[in-house]
Each structure stands twice: as C-alpha cells, then as structure tokens.
Image: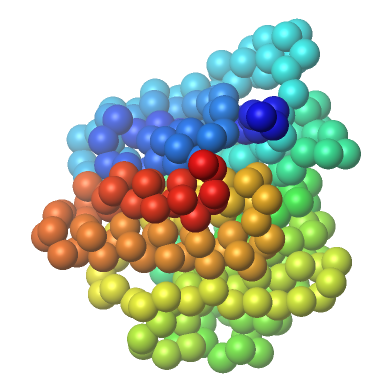
Amino acid sequence: MTKQKRVAAIHDISGFGKCSLTVALPILSAAGIETSIMPTAVLSTHTGGFTGFTYRDLTSDLRPFMQHWKSLNLTFDAIYSGFLGSFEQIEIVGDFIDSFKTKDNLVVVDPAMADNGALYSLFTPDFAAEMTKLCSKADIIVPNITEAAMMLGETYREGPHERSYIENLLHGLSKLGANKIVLTGVYFNNKELGAACLDSNSGEINYAMSDQVEGFFHGTGDIFASVLLAAILNGKSLDSAAKIAVDFTQGSILRTKIAGTDPLYGVNFEAGLPKLIKQLELF
C-alpha cells in the first residue's frame, strides 16, 4: 500500500453551515488523505446570511501551531489555505508556506474574499492586494471571477462570459506566480456553469462544465476546491480533477435544491462521497 498523503488545511471552522473546515476535512478524509487542520477562527455559524453568530479569532494561536508542528518535523504533501480573516493571518500563512514548502509538495490557495462583484463586508481593497502576494507563493490558485478581477485590477463582468475575458483573466493570474490556475463561476450561456483551467507550463486551457442549478448556495467554493485537491493528490490531472470537482459540486447543489433545504444551511455534499471515492479509484 502506498504511503498516505497528508494535507495541512488552514481555514476557519463554522459549527453550522457547511463551509471551510467542516467540508474540507470530511472530503479530504473520504479521499484517503490525512488532514491536519490549523483553524484560523471558530464561529457558531458561517457569516453569509446568519445574524448573531459567535466569532473567536485564533490569530494568536497560529504561530504557536506552526512552531509546534515544525518542532515535530512534520511534512505535508499539500498546504491548503482558504478564508483568512485579517492581514496578519495572510502574513502568517505566507510564513507557514515558506517554512513547510518543499520541492515535492503542493501549495493550494483559495483566495476566499469576494463574490458577485463585491468584497465580503469585512474586507477592504487593500486586502485583495495582500492576498495577491499570498497567491504568488502557490502552485495552484482557485479564485472565482470576482476575486480574479480584484487581484488583477480588472473590471468584473457578470456572465454569460466571453471566452476572451475568461482567458485574459487566466493569463493575468498566471503572472502572479502560480503554475496552475482554476477559475470558478465561469459560464458562457445560461445552461452550463463550471471552471476554466490553465496550466502555465503547457499553456493549455481546459473547461469543465455542468448543468446550472438556479439559486445561490453557501460553501460551494470550499467544496469545489477541496474535491479538486483530493483528486489531484490521488493522481488526477488538473483538467480531470476540475471536472470531478465541478460535477461533485453540481450534484451537491442539485440534491439540496430537490430536497428544498434552506441554502443558508449548506449543500448536501455528504451523499456524494461514495461516488467520489469510486471516481478516485480508492478501492
């Protein structure tokens, strides 16, 4: 049996609402990957629509976490960061990457800070500039179109998109430093939605699309990025991993829509895990 892969997942954790670590951990674990978590904050629910939630900032714990892991000589096959709540956390994650990066492991950054043409309410435009610096340390970045446009100083355009706009964003993002770009929220018509991928080494661009499901559903970006990473660590190519992640995310949304579940609560990704395990050929 091959050695088990290990990921350091650096995200916040919401007790209710299915996002960040509460989706990353089960998805990566189901894919056979040991997942070590470094929580950046603990919340009672996610912040996208709930009111009265609790929030505990764990910034002061991050460097001691990192120092302890270093003292144990831990190594990781991938470092995976998501939502970060402050400039200081971005700096700390950058230092974590510098400390644990090797020639053989993978750094994946999801610059989770904006959607639908606007920054999340707690961020300023300066935050986007700082996140660009973190993306420069990554091997793979997974922004949505809003985040991509903000990091590049480009105009955000709602879909349906023109291929030239999407491909200009991809090439612009590649100049930030990452070798592989996966741009989410791409659609050229009102029937399909998915992701665009650029491998800077080959210059190849691929698209992974699936049927659109009407509505806005929380946590889907975290689900997509987690499945993408799980597939890549199980030997799938970038374009194959993107297709698996698009289909998995779409299936999770569709189950939730059919069941009539409040989209604030997150999507039913759990029921898709058995199929994902088969797709990844884990047995």
Q: Is residue 182 left or right of residue 102?
A: left
| Above/below status of 269 relative to 151 | above
Q: Residue, x 41% and y 59% (percent of image)?
A: 248
| Residue 99 x/y as whole percent | 80, 26
Q: Is residue 127 visible?
A: no
Q: Is residue 121 left or right of residue 64?
A: left
| Residue 50 x/y as whole percent | 22, 44
| Above/below status of 218 relative to 250 | above
Q: Is residue 53 left or right of residue 135?
A: left
Question: How many discs appear?
Answer: 0
Q: Residue, x 45% and y 28% (percent of image)?
A: 41
In this orientation, which residue lies closer to the viewer: 101 or 48? 101
Q: Residue, x 54% and y 49% (percent of image)?
A: 281
| Residue 81 x/y as whole percent | 60, 40
In this orientation, which residue lies closer to the viewer: 147 or 231? 231
Q: Give the quarter of the figure containing the N terminus.
A: top right
Q: Residue, x 57% and y 64% (percent of image)?
A: 242
Q: Is residue 27 visible?
A: yes
| Residue 8 x/y as whole percent | 62, 30
| Above/below status of 128 relative to 210 | above
Q: How is the image coloured?
A: rainbow
